[in-house]
Image (tube, rainbow, N blue to C red):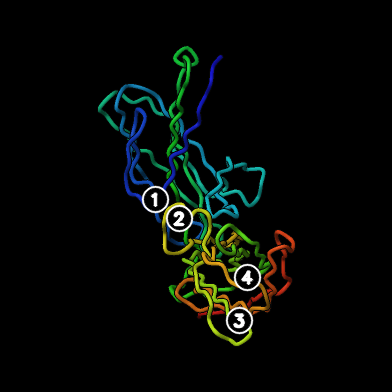
Amino acid sequence: MLRIILLILTCLFVINTHAGEFAVAPLVINIEGDKNTRIPFEFTIKAKKTGKVTLKIYDLNQVETGHMGFVEGDKEIKSSKSNWIKIKDTQYSIKGGEFRLAKGYVKIPSKAKGQHLAAIMVEEDQKEADKKGITVNVRYAVVLKINAQKSKKRIRSRTKFENLSFHKVKEGWEFEGYFQNLSKIEGLLNTQLQLRNKDKRLVGRFSLKTLSAWQRNEEGSMVYPGSRVKLFGTLDKDIAEGVYTVRIKNMFNERNQPVFRHEITLKENGNKKRPDQADAKGLAGS
């Protein structure tokens, strides 16, 4: 029975890479220009051996783990970036060792604000007759980072931290909460949780990050406009049950955000997770 493994190779910060039977560069294109005008872009596709590739437009959205989700663009959906982007050719036949220059343009609507993400997915176009046994389909996502801001003035950031919860783990306590970027800009988030006892003595300090940031061993979590991500981290030592004060500091886009403060009761035999309704939100930066 035919088994197909879908391998999506995506990267927001790597300039070039190779896999499968072709290579694509660059993998990130910054788009800036006047609204309602055609802003051109291009990238190269090089074949390791003769074959075909197809190009499709995808919308990007960040899921709560911090990873990027890809959904094929639909012009019937008003918010889809497929209404902004035009690709000159959607299919290429390339001989081994040769390359093609893929071209297109972005037309930013007049009412658009802030920063936006889209992708051109480049995929091997394999014939059914060639698909024997286990087939690996290789996709590259050429990410378009579209800046719809006319002014170079720093955009005010708006964020929210909420739904703190915690539970006992083997050698300590795990905490998690949700951070929402209500701004029109992306930014790097650095979050630190401090825990103090009833005498106000610091008993623990550690980072909260997205799953994506932990997996990549990154210092902070990248959060894109409008995204809501889950942050978590562990106090890797046992401390006595009792009442403690949690203080969470979020620095987003190089600006301090409103500090989250809340009193909690650590109890090993309590509920596995106990969400608290306290939150912190507000404006920061200029």
For label 1, count other residues whose C-alpha is less than 10 Å away and answer few (under 14), some (14-19) or many (20+). Answer: many
Residue 174 percent location from the top left of the image: 59, 62
Q: Secondary structure at mark 1?
A: strand
Residue 136 percent location from the top left of the image: 45, 26
Give yes or no for contact between labels 4 and 3 (Cβ–Cβ under 8 Å): no
Residue 48 percent location from the top left of the image: 29, 27
For label 4, count other residues whose C-alpha is less than 10 Å away and answer few (under 14), some (14-19) or many (20+). Answer: many
For label 2, count other residues whose C-alpha is less than 10 Å away and answer few (under 14), some (14-19) or many (20+). Answer: some
Residue picked out by circle 1? 28
Residue at x 48% of width, y 15% of height? 133
- Which one is nearer the viewer's eye here, 229 or 265? 265
Q: Of label 4 and label 3, which has the lower sequence position?
A: 4
Q: Is residue 96 above or below residue 206?
A: above
* Residue 221 shows up from this direction: yes
Q: Secondary structure at mark 3?
A: loop
Q: Secondary structure at mark 2?
A: strand
The answer for how far apart the CA atoms under marks 2 and 4 are is 26 Å
Residue picked out by circle 3? 197
Q: Secondary structure at mark 4?
A: strand
Residue picked out by circle 2? 145
Q: Of label 3 and label 1, which has the lower sequence position?
A: 1
Q: Of label 2 and label 3, which has the lower sequence position?
A: 2
The answer for how far apart the CA atoms under marks 2 and 1 are is 7 Å
In the image as oriented, which residue stretches furthest toward the left?
97
Residue at x 42% of width, y 29% of height? 53
Amino acid identity at mark 1: Val
Q: Of label 1 and label 4, which has the lower sequence position?
A: 1
Q: Of label 2 and label 1, which has the lower sequence position?
A: 1
